[in-house]
Amino acid sequence: MKKWVLILISVVLLILDNSLMPFLAIRGAFPSLLFTFAIACSIVSGRKEAVTIGVISGLLQDIYFYEGFGINSLTNMLICLLAAIIGENIYREKKLIPVISMFFLYVLKVISIYLILKIANKTINIHIGIYASLYSTLIMFFGYNFVLRLYDKKYKNRSWRFK
C-alpha cells in the first residue's frame, strides 16, 4: 500500500484514539485503534511495510505519550515486525490467529513499556493496559477483515499473464 495512504489512515485513527475512544472507556481502559490497525497491517503486508507502519504509528502515539518520547516508536516497530513474522506463517484469511496474536502482542507492548518506564523510575497502571488489550482484541475481531480487504485490492489489481 502507498505510504501516504498509511500515514493518512494512521493520522485519522490517532485523532479517533484521542478524541472518541476515551468516551468508550471501560474501567478506564480504551482500545488503541492505531495500534490495532498497525498490527493488522503488519500481519497482512510483510516485514518491510510492518517496520514502516510500526515506526509511523509509534511516532504518532509518542506525540501524546509525555512520559517517554520514543518508547512507542521502538516497541511498535519491534512488535509490528513480530506480527509480520507471524503473518508469514499463517493463513491470513482466517482471523482466529490474528485476533489471538493481537491480544498477546498488545500485552507484550504493555509489559515492555512498563519495564522501560520502571527503569526510568516512572510508573503506569499495568491493569488498564491488560484491559485495553482485551478491548483492542475485540476491535481486531471486527476490523481485521477491513484491513484484509484493503490490502487484497492491491493484489487483485494485478493482471494475469498466461504464457
Image (cartoon, rainbow, N blue to C red):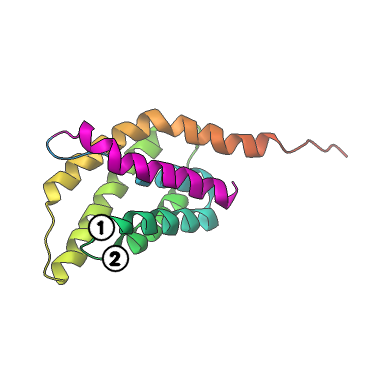
Give the SS element for disc 2.
loop
Quadrant where the C terminus is found in the figure: top right
The residue range painted magenta reads 1-26
How far, Cα to Cα, is label 2 from label 1? 7 Å
Q: Does the magenta stretch include residue 22?
A: yes
* Residue kind at label 1, given as amino acid type: Phe
Circle 2 Cα neighbour tier, 10 Å, few/some/many (<14 / 14–19 / ≥20)? some
The quadrant where residue 133 appears: top left
Q: Please, which residue is most extreme toward the bottom here?
A: 120
Q: Which of 16 and 159 is in front in this view?
A: 16
Secondary structure mostly seen in the magenta stretch = helix
Q: Which residue lies furthest to the right in this view?
A: 163
The residue closer to the viewer here, 66 or 47, is: 66
User: Residue sitting at 56 percent across and 52 percent down?
Assistant: 3
- Residue 73 horizontal side relative to residue 124, left or right: right
Identified by mark 2, the residue type is Phe
Residue 65: mark: 1
The image quadrant that residue 64 belongs to is bottom left
Q: In the figure, 50 relative to 151: above or below? A: below
Q: In the rendered image, which residue does mark 2 sit on?
A: 69
Q: Residue 149 carries which label?
A: none
What residue is shown at x 15% (from left), y 45% (from top)? 128
In x, y percent, where is residue 127? Answer: 12, 46
The residue that appears at 23% across and 60% down in the rendered structure is 113
Q: At which x and y percent is residue 101?
A: 35, 43
Asked whether the residues under the numbered discs 2 and 1 touch, taking CB atoms below 8 Å apart as contact, a structural biologist would say yes
Q: SS at mark 1?
A: loop
